[in-house]
Amino acid sequence: MHRLLQLVLLGLIGVLPGCSMTSAGKPMGQLAPEINATLTQSELILAPGDVLAVTFPRLDGWNQEAVTVQTDGKASFLSLGIVHVAGRTLPMLNEKLREEYGKFLAQPDLTVRVVQSAPRTVVLMGEVIEGGSFALPAGRLSLLEAFGLAQGAIRDTAKLDHTMLVRWIPAENRVRTWKIDASVEEWGAEQSILLQAHDVIFIPAKPVVHVNDWIDRYIRRNIPVPYLTFTQ
């Protein structure tokens, strides 16, 4: 099982049993400051489809101009072979490559940069008719705007007051989850919940009571995003 998927499961297991599964989440406006404080401000989180260049200032023969992150989140580097890339920031990947090259190079001075970025997406799943992976527009996307991307087609059976948000936070090397009361009555909150690339939003049909069944049905089987491959 991929490391980040393991972290997602551990995060859910650790967070969900600690609260009543039949009680609603906290109101959107109340949670917005806490959730928005975890937004990645500047560092790009690498994802499948990104094309990287690796430059060795002192070793021209080791340079690579087009290293593509594959759909499984991995990339192939000269003399190293396969390395997990998706889910890391550029500084994290630089550190990882220096560590690996340092095992056989005396001076593993190198720089990694992105030469072509793949589209960034969020995932909306559960009780929506048009769920799936949605490309992020320029700037920030709010939770309500994400609902709109699904054509506003939220099923009558949706428990909006039990909306789940799963976010990977690379700076903390962990996943965080929130249960949000996103019911229509809360849509007028003064502060919006902002999303970022790789967020997963899940709207259940009913309160989650059997946590293991919910994890198996919606996390193990249905998250259609390959960035769940981060390895420390």
Image (tube, rainbow, N blue to C red):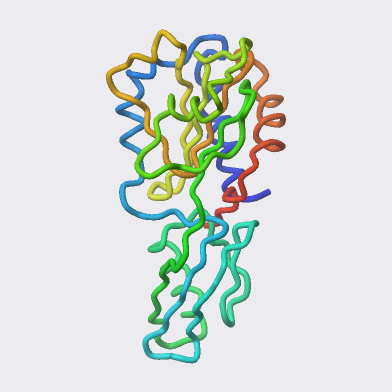
Q: Residue at x 42, y 42 (%)?
A: 137
Q: Residue furthest left?
A: 190
Classify 157 as above or below 108.
Answer: above
Report the front residue among 190 and 45.
190
Q: Residue furthest front?
A: 151
Classify 132 as above or below 95.
Answer: above
Q: Residue at x 39, y 75 (%)?
A: 111
Name the quadrant containing residue 112. Answer: bottom left
Q: Residue at x 62, y 50 (%)?
A: 226
Q: Residue at x 40, y 79 (%)?
A: 110
Report the front residue among 224 and 141.
141
Please state the horizontal and vertical placement of residue 124, each as a whole percent of the image.
56, 31
Name the quadrant containing residue 89. Answer: bottom left
Please state the horizontal and vertical placement of residue 81, each as a whole percent of the image.
62, 75
Classify 171 as above or below 160.
Answer: below
Please state the horizontal and vertical placement of residue 17, each as a whole percent of the image.
56, 21
Query: How many labels, in total?
Result: 0
Classify 63 as above or below 222.
Answer: below
Please state the horizontal and vertical placement of residue 52, each as a whole percent of the image.
48, 69
